[in-house]
Image (cartoon, rainbow, N blue to C red):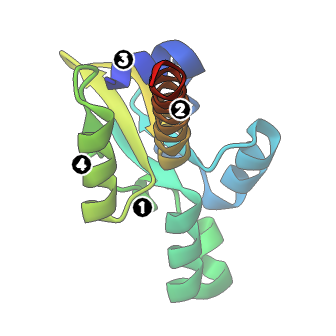
Amino acid sequence: MKISDVLASKGRRVETVWPSKRLDQIPQLFDERNISSAVVVDPAGKPLGIITDRLIIHALAKRGASALHLTAEDVMASPLPSCAPDDGVSSALRKMTDERIRHLVVMSGGAMLGIVSIGDLVKIRLQDADLEARVLREVALAHLSTG
């Protein structure tokens, strides 16, 4: 299965923030939208990086409460962790594991097509495993009934 299939299933909505957005404002956005990341974009909508709940926690751990006065640009991960719509789910999961990240922005020709989380990809893998198990069970039952 490809990343484009995942986006077709889950949707292409991506929450974005300006580079100047202060960290003290971002957790509220995450809570309201039930998300844990947002793409940092310039005024033209070009992705610059990504801000995640984990990056905010790291900033707080290093700087204490003064970190809340930092901006998204100060804390964002850049270059943007990304994948292509034609990438396979397995390769995206491998990239997330190797880089210890939980989100990949789907990019094609400089355009942002969507975002996938590790949860999205695990859900797809579990659905695939369930389908495979059902098919194998049906084949086994058919084989037993003819045997």
Considering the numbered disc 4 on the image, is that residue within a helix, a strand or a loop? Answer: loop
Identify the residue under disc 1: 74
CA–CA distance between discs 3 and 1? 31 Å
Q: Nearer the viewer, residue 134 or 117?
A: 134
- Return the disc, 2 or 4, that comes first in the chain's sequence: 4
The residue beneath circle 3 is 4
Residue density around tag 3, few if under 14, some if 14–19, many if 20 or more, within 10 Å: many
Residue 105 can be seen in this image: yes
For marks 2 and 3, give the CA distance. 29 Å
Q: CA distance from mark 2 to mark 1?
A: 53 Å
- Which sits in the foreground, 54 or 99? 99
Residue at 55%, 29% in the rendered image: 134
Please, what is the three-letter code of the amino acid marked with disc 1? Asp
| Position of residue 113 measured from the top left corner of the image (x, y, whole percent) | 39, 18
Q: For mark 2, what is the residue? A: 137
| Residue 138 on image: x %, y % | 53, 24
Secondary structure of residue under mark 1: helix
Counting residues from the N terminus, which is met first, the one under dot 4 or under dot 3? 3
Q: Quadrant of residue 99?
A: bottom left
Query: What is the three-letter code of the residue carrying label 4?
Result: Pro
Lower position in the chain sequence, tag 4 or tag 1: 1
Q: Whole-percent x and y of residue 43?
A: 42, 24
Classify mark 2: helix, strand or loop: helix
Q: Amino acid at mark 3?
A: Ser
- Give how far apart the Cα atoms at labels 4 and 3 are: 22 Å
Residue of label 4 = 79
Residue under the point 37% across and 34% down: 105
